[in-house]
Amino acid sequence: METRFTRGKSAILERPLSRPKTEVSVSAFTLLFSEVVQYCQSRVYSVSELQARLSEMGQRVGGSLLDVLVLREKNGKRETKVLNILLFIKVSVWRALFGKEADKLEQANDDDKTYYIIEKEPLVNTYISVPKENSSLNCAAFIGGIVEAILTHSGFPAKVTVHWHKGTTLMIKFDEAVIARDKALEGK
């Protein structure tokens, strides 16, 4: 008797998580993202407030994206080392979001808790026209929010800031406890 209610329809809970990758057209993405930027811009008074708002929106996306990618790519297993989570972001997260890996991953020479993800031309900056008075605006703050949420929800609390250097650079500064834990794991 119950089969007649589900016949012809697939319940959302019965669909596999490892469904094939789908692509969104660049024009649809850029239209949606430009509307997000305009929405945020109409509610703030400075470039720094706009970047903070974009980062906040990115954090909401990053929290959800982490759960999906860990299930699809890692079979539910989370990373325990700093370098592994950064490589996961550089490769898997970037590929899921932009269809390619990030350009570079570097560690700061003078600080063991600072890392950089470098993207020469991020998609979020490509189709946004910035007026001269707002020339310091970097819409990749949205991506920075995604990365910060992924790191924080994975147990690697960090602060991610976005800078214009070699294209766009996401500067990741981990908490001291994260680096201490990573060194203790390497010592085992």
Image (cartoon, helix red, strand yellow):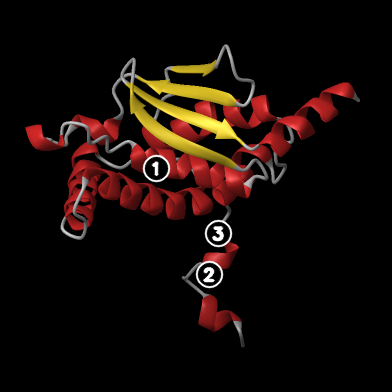
Q: CA distance from mark 3 to mark 1?
A: 15 Å
Residue drawn at x 20%, y 60% as measured from the top left: 43
Amino acid at dot 1? Thr
Q: For mark 2, what is the residue?
A: 11
Nearest to N terminus: mark 2 or mark 1:
2
| SS under mark 1 | loop
| SS under mark 2 | loop
Q: For mark 1, what is the residue?
A: 22
Give the class, few, some or many, for how many residues have Cα within 10 Å of label 3's Cα (few <14, many ≥20).
few
Nearest to N terminus: mark 3 or mark 1:
3
Residue drawn at x 52%, y 82% as measured from the top left: 5
Q: Is residue 19 visible?
A: no
Amino acid at dot 3? Arg
Q: Are marks 3 and 2 in contact (CB under 8 Å)?
A: yes
Q: For mark 3, what is the residue?
A: 15
Classify the position of the N terminus by image quarter. bottom right
Give the class, few, some or many, for how many residues have Cα within 10 Å of label 2's Cα (few <14, many ≥20).
few
Q: CA distance from mark 3 to mark 2?
A: 7 Å
Q: Nearer the viewer, residue 127 or 113?
A: 113
